Amino acid sequence: MEKQYDVIIAGTGVGGLYTALCLPENMNILVISKRELDLCNSALAQGGVAAVYKPVDDDTVKLHTNDTLIAGGFKNNPDSVKVLVTEAAQEIQHIIDIGVDFDRDEKGELDRTLEGGHCRRRIFHHKDSTGAEVTAKIRAAVLKRENITVLDNALLCRMKKINGGFAADILRNDEHFTVTALFAVLATGGIGRVYDYTTNSAIATGDGIAIAYDMGAEIRNLSLIQFHPTAYNNKAARECFLISESVRGEGAYLLNCNKERFMHNYDERLELAPRDVVSRSIMLESRKTESDEFYLDIRHEGREYLAERFPMIYDFLKTQGIDMGCDLIPIFPCQHYLMGGINVDTSAETDIDGLYAVGECSHTGVHGNNRLASNSLLEALVFGHRAAEDIAKKYSPDKVCSEFAFEQPENAVPIPKGIRTEIRHIMQSSFFVIPDKQKALEGFERISEIRRMLDGGCYIIDRDYVEARSLAAVAYLVLKEVI
């Protein structure tokens, strides 16, 4: 391990990896992964990448823009949306060039599917595991680069702005070490683990957001949390399997406990309304029927087609005793995505010089109040590339950082048990789809107490502490916005 790098990137989802790949090969780059390299939210993305690329069916950048704005309640940042949709085509071409295998039709042309909120079929996909395919191919390209060091099971505990750049406290194999870098990129993913139930992977504890907040970076719209309407409802697992938006895009119906369609009572777009509309509709229907039993019905498409089009979902449901070709699929809304985060400009830079944020932990403003399906992987690609270009423009090989070493507390003890569980319960009960203002106020007061305890105590800086402190910071910032 070297002690100084040109760039340190925290996170090995599409945002972090693609930023590394787009940086010049004369730069010395360190990429750290909190857990295994393939454990990230990007790899869980099923639907695809939305883009107007060699347009067909009269699709245009203007239509993609309009769909994005409608889904976001017109609260989107127009400059960021323009960047997203106009630069989509070049990123699609780039990842195809590095080997991403998008599905093709019988003529060999790139296939496009439809998802909720889109007026055209513009979703490029690899079966129902697009995120895994895109992440794997970008990761393979990164690992071939001699100028990039990639470390797995390396937890970013703290970061500090120093003379000339940044210092990072990293925990790996139970040992702390400090590295410095001229530039830093936070690509640490979402905040799903602040809830009892989420589609997010185990890494999603908001670490990058908490670290940026500690450094004084602006955090914006953290209460803009998306709840996906169709997570598999087994009422047991904390990490809920996602039934992709594209299942409804290919013709699935939503049914209530009486096995009746109900979306016509809430929105004229029916099952293809944006995610926030569908999730809210399910919750209102749940109150009306006094039941949380809801289903997806795509039996009319047939077993052969479904097994081919949705192999990952099909195989998962089979393990649950469900054949989606002849059975209904139990679903219910679940925490899925964060629209807010570390505020950045259109080059993905924060208000701290040299600090960038990419992917779900960032707030580019492209999603407004609600993310349009399959714009998330696209956002990571477009703004990861832009971050790399901006860093390259500002980079000087003659620059160096001052030395720095993080101190570890003496006579420290482990944090009390149950903190993370308590935080999750507070968020699940107070801020889920339709918020409960009174519970949010009570929860905010308790979260504030937890934060004071964690900040004021002498605790071992290990994974438990870092994640609990991150979750407390995230919950605090979310509830602070809503009370």
Image: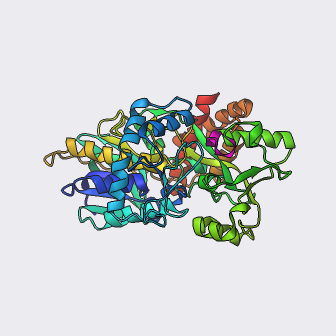
Where is residue 279 drawn, in percent x and y?
69, 43
Quarter in which the C terminus is drawn:
top right
The residue sitting at 50% across, 51% down in the picture is 466
In-image side of 343 versus 143 (left or right): right
Magenta stretch, residue numbers: 270-276
Left or right: 390, with 195 as reference point: left
Q: Which residue is drawn at 66% across and 33% down?
A: 445
Q: Image quarter for residue 436?
A: top right
Q: Which residue is drawn at 32% across and 48% down?
A: 385
Q: Which residue lies furthest to the left in this view?
A: 398
Q: Does the magenta stretch include residue 212?
A: no
**Image quarter in which the N terminus is found:** bottom left
- Looking at the image, residue 115 lies above or below residue 175: above
Magenta stretch, main secondary structure, is helix
Position of residue 432 measured from the top left corner of the image (x, y, whole percent): 68, 41
**In the rendered view, does 361 fall on the left or right side of 415?**
left
In the foreground, 77 or 154: 77
Q: Nearer the viewer, residue 415 or 207?
A: 207
Residue 213, quarter of the rendered image = top left
In percent of width and height, residue 99 lies at 36, 65
